[in-house]
Each structure stands twice: as structure tokens, then as C-alpha cells.
Image: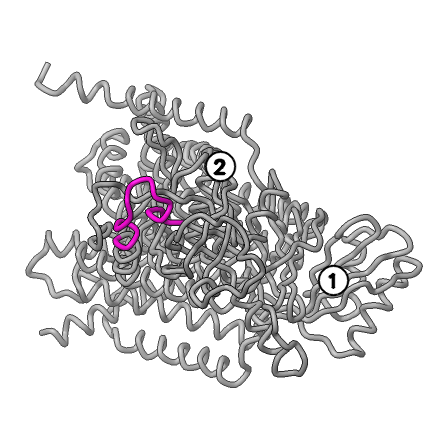
């Protein structure tokens, strides 16, 4: 037996064991760990907070009311950071009126804890201790220096005299909860200061170090919300006036793990601009109706079944095995989502739609490469052709998935809210799709092609023939890149048409971006939210969000309404319930606030830049630039189509837009991977001829992948109900535009750039 033979023979068994272990573990997690459903699918806990003005503030006048709204908006951003740190994914945080904040948290286990953390002001200050407080000064006026002091009890209850704050929370860079079993300190919080804070901390500890050991004045008091949480003594090794350098300190105390992590969370999140008070806490229903959820589930099931039938019809036995692997892909993704405690929402499912599409694409890439290898007669058996197909397709699969993972990672780390949730689901889905295609599909395929029956009848495998698209291209051999400037002119014309739609019609931003109106009713009789949602839509408000908000209560959230329109909504609810009292009617701010939108935009731009750098490193600058330019082309066209159609630009559209961006890059990477391969092999061929050959060779994969994705998206658009229609429409437009741009925008642009480079 030749050297290495036993290892080659064992590799299919190793892959099989890996696949079995991954599927078994995923099945166990899926059956034992429940997944958290978002507000749109299940509902959650609603906490209403009210901001309290600072002492002496005058709240009269319109200008002051506007100031209150601005302060409340800043408070919303701080609260959103705390919620993200709490581990609650996909929350809804909106300003209601000028001084109320409505926080909706899906799947929360401990609402009281969340209300406590959200309601704490988190005013952090560091003070020099002047000594113990003995008592009042016998009625005499305190000396001037005493007027600037504060008296607070320390951790033991002994009163301390404190100088005014030397540092505040603004001087803190970051905080982290840590456990140190060796020192006996247990859980503590490490605080790192900013550059300016580091100097202030050194001066504060240097002044305290001038007092003798054991003197109360050698202590430093750390105060949170007017309460001393720690007052450690400066170590005897610290010399007078030198202070503690290094810009870091520890807050110690009788902390357990929860308290230490909570304190670090509050310090990192920053102080609230004004105090807030929890005035209401209750359970709310799903923002999507049960009928919409059922329709969406049926549409997804039917679309997935049609996609599976198409893959089986095209690739026969290999298609059936790929379908099994895709089912395992869904199982792995679901289990990973549950294990990480992520929240599953309807827009978040966009990440899975893209990931499943990439899993289909990975299988199609492998099977089409295997067909090429078999047709070349260099691989005489399906088994050898399949092995070569996996090897040849690996670089395209890896590059497309890595570019998508770069975007998903940056969206997670730099964005927040639903954009961050999209990054989580997309990242999980992409990793699961790679396991599905490269491990599970290959393990199943290895066993299948080893069967004697398939060796005798190779056409049953689905890779022992070229397929209709490749046969047609082989007969005609069209020169698609004979006139690249014509394709670029066509792309420019469509781009101008789309951009004119944005300029002429404008964008219809949804409530998430613009804010709107929130009306809550106490109804005489119980009204099911689905029934109310349907009636309000028939009355002319199809985008109204209707939730149950307690027993015999309904909340209606809409865009900005006139008084006459609000009266129509009230009449509709009153007619359904046999009477209804309006108990709240307030203007609400956008749930996708300014900071969240800015963070999402920054994350998106950084992700595009990172993808450009990666593609330039893996290919060439002109190919990377062409891919990103095609991506921008797709985004403008999709936004322009929605502008011309008058469709709302809301959170669901945002998720669809991010999905299209991922799909567009993936499509371009596949074409450019083939260009790179052919350019290495045929170095003397002109670039435009190599590009045309690459397009013809990847066209069967493009057609089959697009058809597979179109089935499920069409089913969602036709059967998914009003909720999913716009989402699926955006993805269908993105699928068509992305497929076109990867072939007839990115590739011609690369040819023209190559010509200009000479």
C-alpha cells in the first residue's frame, strides 16, 4: 500500500464521525434549550420609565419642552447600551412624549432586575476622604471649607467627610468584573481611566498617601448614586504626592458575580443625564399577529420544499443529499442560536435566509465543478470528479463566506439593536452553512458514490453529465464581454433611474426612523389583537402596530396622525370592543434613534472597507474595487425601486438591504475566483477573454443558485402575508440585481479598469 493510503481511507470516516457528532449535539441542544423569540413573534416585558428634571429646572414653555425631549433622547441611547450589555437582544426603546421612555424586552427572565438596572442613574464619582464625621457644629455656621464637603456613611455605616469629587464617570475608560481567588478579594471591578483621568487619579491618591496608615484621610471614597460603594485605603507603599500611576484601580467589596458584573455594566454604560423612575411594568403581546406568523411559517415551508425539489431535479442523488445537509444546516443554526441565548425575530431571520442561500450556493458550486471535472474526461468516475469538485470549489466557498463573516462581525461589534441582531444570526448561519456543505454534504456524498449501483449508473449521481445550461453554452459559446462598455452604460442608466426615484419620490421612512404616535385604549370587552390589526388596516392604516398590553388593553403605534385620523382609529377600536377609553395618547420618538442609525452606518462603511481590503489581498485591487462598486450599485437600485413603488423604508427593509449586500459580494467573489484561477492557467490570454470564459463557466452555478433562492423568496412574497411581502420583494429585487451586477457590472468594470491600467 502506498504511503499515505491509510490516511486517505480514514478521512471519509473521520468526516462522517464529525458530521454525526455535530448533528447529534445540535439535536440535543435544540430539544433541551428553548430559543428566545423576539417581540414581533412572542411579545415580552414592557417597562415605562419617566425622566425627572434636575432640581431647579423650569419645565414651562415650548423651548423647555423641546429641551426635555432632547435630554430624554440622550437617556434613550444610554439605556440602549445598558440593555445590550444585559444580554437582551432585539429590544425596542422609544421616547414617548417629552419625558417618558417605553422599553420592550423580549424573553426576559427577571424583569425586576432589568428595571432596577435601567432605573439607576449611575452617577460615579471619586472623592478624597477628609476624616470621620463626629457630629454637627453645635448650631454654628460651618466654616467655608466645610460648606464644600459631603457627609456619607461608608460600607460599615460610619459617617465620612468627603471633599467634592476629584473624578467622575467621564474620566473612566472601561470597567470589567473579575474574580481573584488567590488574593482572597473574590469578585471585584477593575476600572481603567482615560488619559486625563489617569493624571487626576494619581493626584487624588498622592494627596491621600500623605496621611499616616490607618488614618481615615488616607482612604479614597468611590460613590455611585450618592452612596459609598467602596472606600479603600491607599497602599502604604504609595509615597506622598507620587500617587498611583498606571491609570487603573480596583473597586473591592462584598460583591457576588452578579453585583460585580452589574456594577461594571453601569460604569461602562455611563451615567444617565437625568434620574428616571419606573412608573409601569407589564407583559405585552407580539407585534405580529398569529395569522401573520402562521402564514409566514407556511410560506417558508412551501418555499423550502420547492427549493429542495428543484435541487433534487437538477442534481438527482447529490441534490437529495444536499437537501438533507440543508436540513442539518437549519438544525445547527437553530441550536447555536439557542445555545448563545440570542433572540430570534422576523428581520433576524433575514440572516438565516442569506446563510441558507449560501449553503445552497456552496453545494451547487461543488456539484458544478464536479460536472466540469467529469466532462473533461480527466476524472473518469463520479467519485474522483466529486473529490476534485470539493477541492476546486473550496477557495470560492471560503472567500465568499469569509467576506460575509467580516461584515457580520463588524455589524455585531460596531452596531446595536436590530442591526447587531442581524450580524449575530448571519454569522451563526454562515458558519453552519460551511459545516453543512464541507462536512455533512461531503460525508453523505462520499458514502453515496462508493455504492456499486451508482458506479454502474453514474448519471444517477447528478454529476456525470454537464446539464442543460452548460450544454447550451458549449454549443453557442457567446462572447458576453465583447462590449463591456455597453453593459456599464446599461448599469449606469438603471442607476440614474433608481437615483431619480429617490430624488423625485423621496423615501417613505417608517415609524422606526421617524417616530409617530402611540395610543393606548382600555376596552369594555376583550379584543384579539389580530382582529383589531385587521380592522385598523381596513380603516386605512396598514402599517399600524397593534399589541395587547394587559387585560382589556390595546396599544396602537402608528406614523404621525392628524386629529381626524386619530379619531378614525379610536372609532374603529370602539366599534370592535363595544366601547373604549383612551388612557394614553403621546407622540413617540424613533426606535431606530440617531445614535443607532449612525452606529449602523459606521459599521456598514467599515465592513465595506474591510471587505475591499480582504478582496484586494485575495484577488487584485481592481477586482476588489469592482466588487464593492457593484455592491453600491445594488444598494442604490434597491432603495430606488422602493422609492418608486412608495414602499416603506423600515427595520424590515434594513434587514433585507443588509442581506442583499451579503448576497451581492458572495456572487461577485464566485466569478472573480474563477477569473483568478483561469488567469493563472492562461497567462498569455487577454484579461477580457479570461473574464468572458469565467462568466460562461460560472453561469450554470449562477442560474441554479438564483432559481433555488427565487423559489423560497417568491413563496414568502405570495403566501407570507402583508408582513413579509415587502421583505421578500426587497430580497427578490436584490437577488435579480445582485446576479446581474456580479456578471454585467463588476466584471465589465474590472475589464475597463484593467485596460486603463495598461
* Most foreground residue, 232 or 718: 232
Q: Answer whether labels 1 and 2 touch (C-beta < 8 Å).
A: no
- Please state the horizontal and vertical placement of residue 263, each as a whole percent of the image: 46, 45
- Residue 707 visible to the viewer: no
Give the x, y percent position of residue 248: 28, 49
Above or below, 633 against 255 in this view is below
Q: Tell me the tag on residue 347.
A: none
Q: Quadrant of residue 384?
A: top left
Pick the quarter of the image with the N terminus. top left
Q: Work out how far the residue at label 1 is from the one at label 2, CA to CA, in angstroms.
A: 37 Å
Q: Position of residue 92 (x, y in %)?
A: 59, 56
User: Residue 279 versus residue 514: which sits nearer the camera?
Assistant: 279
Q: Outermost residue, bottom direction?
A: 504
**SS of the residue under disc 1:** strand
Q: Secondary structure at mark 2?
A: helix
Residue 649 found in image quarter: bottom right
Position of 753 with respect to 266 (left or right) is left
Q: How is the image coloured?
A: one colour
Q: Residue at x 26, y 49 (%)?
A: 209
The residue carrying pointer 2 sits among few (fewer than 14), some (14 to 19) or many (20 or more) residues within 10 Å by Cα, namely: few
* Residue at left offset 62%, top offset 50%: 39
Question: Quarter of the image holding residue 523?
Answer: bottom right
Q: Residue furthest top?
A: 1
Q: Is residue 258 inside the magenta stretch?
A: no
Looking at the image, residue 619 lies above or below residue 310: below
- Give the residue drawn at x 28%, y 44%: 212
Q: What numbered label is drawn on residue 258?
A: 2
Numbered range of the magenta stretch: 206-221
Q: Which residue is mark 1?
A: 556
Amino acid at each position: 500500500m502506498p504511503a499515505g493510503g491509510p490516511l486517505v481511507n480514514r478521512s471519509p470516516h473521520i468526516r462522517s464521525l464529525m458530521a454525526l457528532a455535530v448533528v447529534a449535539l445540535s439535536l440535543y441542544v435544540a430539544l433541551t434549550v428553548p430559543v428566545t423569540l423576539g417581540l414581533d413573534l412572542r411579545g415580552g416585558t414592557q417597562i415605562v420609565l419617566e425622566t425627572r428634571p434636575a432640581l431647579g429646572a423650569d419645565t414651562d414653555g415650548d423651548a423647555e419642552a423641546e429641551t426635555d425631549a432632547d435630554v430624554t433622547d440622550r437617556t434613550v441611547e444610554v439605556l440602549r447600551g445598558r440593555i445590550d450589555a444585559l444580554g437582551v437582544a432585539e429590544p425596542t426603546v422609544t421616547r414617548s412624549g417629552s419625558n417618558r421612555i417605553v422599553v420592550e424586552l423580549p424573553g426576559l427572565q427577571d424583569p425586576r432586575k432589568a428595571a432596577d438596572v435601567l432605573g439607576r442613574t449611575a452617577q460615579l464619582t471619586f472623592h478624597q476622604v477628609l476624616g470621620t464625621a463626629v457630629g454637627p457644629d453645635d448650631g454654628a455656621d460651618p466654616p467655608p471649607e466645610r460648606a464644600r464637603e459631603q457627609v456619607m456613611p461608608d460600607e460599615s455605616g460610619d459617617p465620612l467627610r468627603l471633599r467634592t469629587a476629584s473624578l467622575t464617570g467621564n474620566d473612566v475608560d472601561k470597567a470589567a468584573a473579575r474574580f481573584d481567588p488567590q488574593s482572597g478579594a473574590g469578585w471585584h471591578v477593575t476600572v481603567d481611566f482615560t488619559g486625563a483621568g489617569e493624571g487626576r487619579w494619581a493626584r487624588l491618591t498622592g494627596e491621600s498617601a500623605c496621611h499616616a496608615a490607618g488614618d481615615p484621610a488616607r482612604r479614597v471614597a468611590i460613590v455611585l448614586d450618592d452612596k459609598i460603594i467602596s472606600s479603600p485605603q491607599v497602599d502604604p507603599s504609595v509615597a506622598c504626592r507620587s500617587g498611583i500611576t498606571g491609570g487603573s484601580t480596583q473597586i473591592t467589596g462584598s460583591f457576588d458575580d452578579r453585583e460585580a458584573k452589574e456594577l461594571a455594566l453601569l460604569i461602562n454604560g455611563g451615567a444617565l443625564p437625568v434620574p428616571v423612575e419606573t412608573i409601569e411594568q407589564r407583559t405585552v403581546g407580539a407585534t405580529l399577529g398569529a395569522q401573520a406568523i402562521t402564514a409566514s411559517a407556511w410560506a417558508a415551508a412551501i418555499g423550502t420544499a420547492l427549493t429542495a425539489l428543484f435541487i433534487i431535479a437538477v442534481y438527482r442523488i447529490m441534490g437529495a443529499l444536499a437537501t438533507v445537509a440543508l436540513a442539518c444546516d437549519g438544525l445547527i443554526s437553530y441550536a447555536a442560536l439557542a445555545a448563545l441565548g440570542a433572540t430570534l425575530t422576523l428581520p433576524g431571520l433575514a440572516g438565516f435566509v442569506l446563510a441558507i442561500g449560501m449553503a445552497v450556493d456552496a453545494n451547487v458550486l461543488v456539484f458544478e465543478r464536479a460536472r466540469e471535472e467529469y466532462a473533461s474526461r480527466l476524472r473518469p468516475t463520479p467519485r474522483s470528479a466529486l473529490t476534485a469538485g470539493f477541492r476546486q470549489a473550496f477557495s470560492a466557498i471560503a472567500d465568499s463566506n469569509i467576506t460575509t463573516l467580516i461584515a457580520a462581525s463588524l455589524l455585531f461589534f460596531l452596531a446595536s439593536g436590530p442591526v447587531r441582531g442581524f450580524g449575530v444570526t448571519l454569522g451563526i448561519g454562515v458558519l453552519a452553512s460551511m459545516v453543512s456543505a464541507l462536512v455533512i454534504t461531503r460525508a453523505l456524498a462520499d458514502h453515496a458514490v462508493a455504492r456499486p449501483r451508482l458506479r454502474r449508473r453514474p448519471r444517477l449521481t447528478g454529476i456525470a453529465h454537464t446539464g442543460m445550461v452548460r450544454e447550451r453554452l458549449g454549443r453557442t459559446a457567446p462572447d458576453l464581454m465583447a462590449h463591456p462598455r455597453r453593459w456599464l452604460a446599461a448599469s449606469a442608466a438603471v442607476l440614474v433611474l433608481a437615483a431619480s426615484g429617490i430624488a423625485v419620490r423621496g423615501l417613505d421612512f417608517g415609524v422606526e426612523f421617524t417616530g409617530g404616535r402611540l395610543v393606548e385604549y382600555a376596552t369594555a370587552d376583550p379584543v384579539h389583537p389580530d382582529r383589531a390589526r385587521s380592522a385598523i388596516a381596513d380603516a386605512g392604516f396598514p402599517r399600524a402596530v397593534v399589541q395587547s398590553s394587559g387585560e382589556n388593553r390595546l396599544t396602537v403605534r402608528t406614523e404621525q396622525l392628524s386629529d381626524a385620523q386619530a379619531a378614525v382609529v379610536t372609532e374603529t377600536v370602539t366599534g370592535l370592543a363595544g366601547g373604549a377609553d383612551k388612557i394614553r395618547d403621546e407622540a413617540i420618538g424613533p426606535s431606530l434613534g440617531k445614535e443607532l442609525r449612525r452606529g449602523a452606518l459606521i459599521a456598514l462603511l467599515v465592513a465595506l472597507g474591510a471587505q475591499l481590503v480582504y478582496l484586494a489581498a485575495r484577488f487584485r485591487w481592481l477586482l476588489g474595487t469592482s466588487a464593492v462598486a457593484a455592491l453600491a450599485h445594488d444598494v442604490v437600485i434597491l432603495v430606488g425601486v422602493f422609492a418608486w413603488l412608495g414602499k416603506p423604508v423600515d427595520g424590515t427593509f434594513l434587514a433585507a438591504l443588509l442581506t442583499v449586500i451579503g448576497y451581492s459580494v458572495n456572487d461577485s467573489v464566485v466569478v472573480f475566483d474563477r477569473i483568478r484561477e483561469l488567469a493563472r492557467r492562461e497567462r498569455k490570454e487577454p484579461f477580457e477573454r479570461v473574464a468572458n470564459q469565467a462568466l460562461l463557466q460560472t453561469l450554470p452555478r449562477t442560474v441554479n443558485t438564483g432559481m433555488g433562492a427565487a423559489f423560497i423568496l417568491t413563496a414568502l412574497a405570495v403566501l407570507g402575508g402583508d408582513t413579509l411581502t415587502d421583505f421578500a420583494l426587497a430580497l427578490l429585487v436584490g437577488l435579480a440585481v445582485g446576479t446581474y451586477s456580479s456578471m454585467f457590472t463588476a466584471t465589465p468594470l474590472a475589464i475597463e479598469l484593467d485596460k486603463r491600467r495598461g
